[in-house]
Amino acid sequence: MNVAFENLNELPKLLEMVVELKSIVEKGNLEKRWFNTHELSEYTGYKYETLKSKIKKGEFVQGVHYFKRDGKLLFDKTEVDNWVMGVKSVNHVSYQKEDDDDIVEEISSLMSA
């Protein structure tokens, strides 16, 4: 590889950039964490209107699944992934619907305690 003498001073900058890119790839930090509604629609496969409906029904919780910033909804990928899988959220919100018998049993145990 031939490098012009005038460009030799650029080699340290280029090496620094390559090392930084390697670090990012190794850490896996290329993944986006925050989605707007249209990006979330593309990511999950749910239609835009369906996502809006889930917000209105309370399936997506503000402060957990999404945040409103400057009039824009920003969805947390981690929490949406947890919701899709029915896993307890980082914020300790369960997305699995409880069985009616479980709820009655829990209330009964609290009352008898």
Image (cartoon, rainbow, N blue to C red):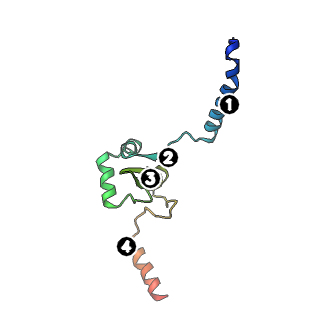
> Does 44 appear above or below 13?
below
SS for tag 3? helix
Upstream in the sequence, badge 3 or badge 4?
A: 3
* Mark 4 / mark 2, whichever is N-terminal: 2
Distance between the alpha carbons at the discs numbered 1 and 4: 59 Å
Name the residue that disc number 1 marks.
16
Crowdedness near tag 2: few (<14), some (14–19) or many (≥20) residues, C-alpha within 10 Å:
few
Q: Where residue 77 sits in the image (x, y, percent)? A: 47, 49
Instruction: Please tell me whether residue 51 is drawn above or below residue 31 in the rendered image.
Output: below
Q: How far across and down, in percent of the image, does residue 7 sit?
A: 67, 16
Q: Which residue is mark 4?
A: 100
The amino acid at mark 4 is Asp
Q: Report the amino acid beneath label 1.
A: Glu
> 81 or 29: which is nearer to us?
29
Task: For label 4, count other residues whose C-alpha is less than 10 Å away and answer few (under 14), some (14-19) or many (20+).
Answer: few
User: Marks 2/3: CA distance?
Assistant: 10 Å
Q: CA distance from mark 4 to mark 2?
A: 35 Å
Residue, disc 3: 80
Circles 1 and 4: CB atoms closer than 8 Å: no
**Residue placed at 38% from the left, 51% from the top?**
70
Nearest the eye: 101 or 61: 61
Q: Earlier in the sequence, mark 1 or mark 4?
A: 1
In front: label 1 or label 4: 1
Does residue 1 appear in this view? no
Q: Which of the two labelled residues, at mark 1 and mark 2, occupies the earlier sequence position?
A: 1
76 in relation to 105, above or below: above
Mark 1 falls on what kind of element? Answer: helix
Query: What quarter of the picture does the N terminus occupy?
Result: top right
x and y, in percent, of residue 35 in the image: 43, 46
